[in-house]
Image (spheres, grey):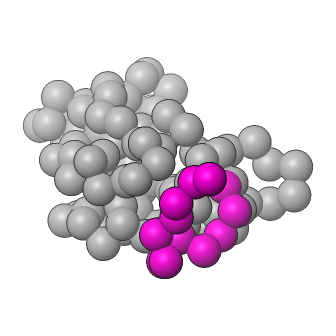
Amino acid sequence: METVAPDCQHPPGRFVPRIDRNACEGKGPCVPACPYHVLALGTLDARQRRGLSLVGRLKAWAHGYRQAQLVAADLCRACGACVRVCPEHAITLQRSLPGETP
């Protein structure tokens, strides 16, 4: 039987972490904070870079385009650990829409 922290009261996939690409600086405290291994640090691909604002592009370039990436969004239980530790406040939790693939 899986043990769930008391603040992780939602079933997996009901909420999805959303990362503000213009705010994330890739410092990465969110990665080890997540008990479900939903996030990893990675490099923004060309498609993700195109969607950045001017300031977002400059910040991303300064940090080697390294940012938090969702690797298992369907495992998120909305405990909020990633949100609490993000120094840029770049992560929010949003309810998944019916039929949405995280």
Q: Is residue 65 above or below residue 3?
A: above
Q: Residue at x 75, y 42 (%)?
A: 101
Judging depth in this view, the residue of 32 and 55 nearest the camera is 32
- Whether residue 34 sits left or right of residue 5 in the image: it is left
Q: Residue at x 69, y 62 (%)?
A: 11
Q: Position of residue 33 (x, y in %)?
A: 29, 56
Say if the magenta span includes residue 4: yes
Q: Is residue 50 above or below residue 1?
A: above
Which corner quadrant of the image does residue 90 belong to?
Answer: bottom left
- Whether residue 60 sits left or right of residue 53 in the image: it is left
Judging depth in this view, the residue of 10 and 95 nearest the camera is 10
- Whether residue 28 sits left or right of residue 16 in the image: it is left
Judging depth in this view, the residue of 28 and 10 nearest the camera is 10
Which corner quadrant of the image does residue 64 belong to?
Answer: top left
Give the mark count.
0
Q: Position of residue 38 (x, y in %)?
A: 47, 44
Magenta residues (range)? 1-12
Q: Residue at x 30, y 34 (%)?
A: 41
Q: Position of residue 5 (x, y in %)?
A: 46, 69
**Residue 53 showing in the rendered view:** no
Q: Residue at x 25, y 31 (%)?
A: 65
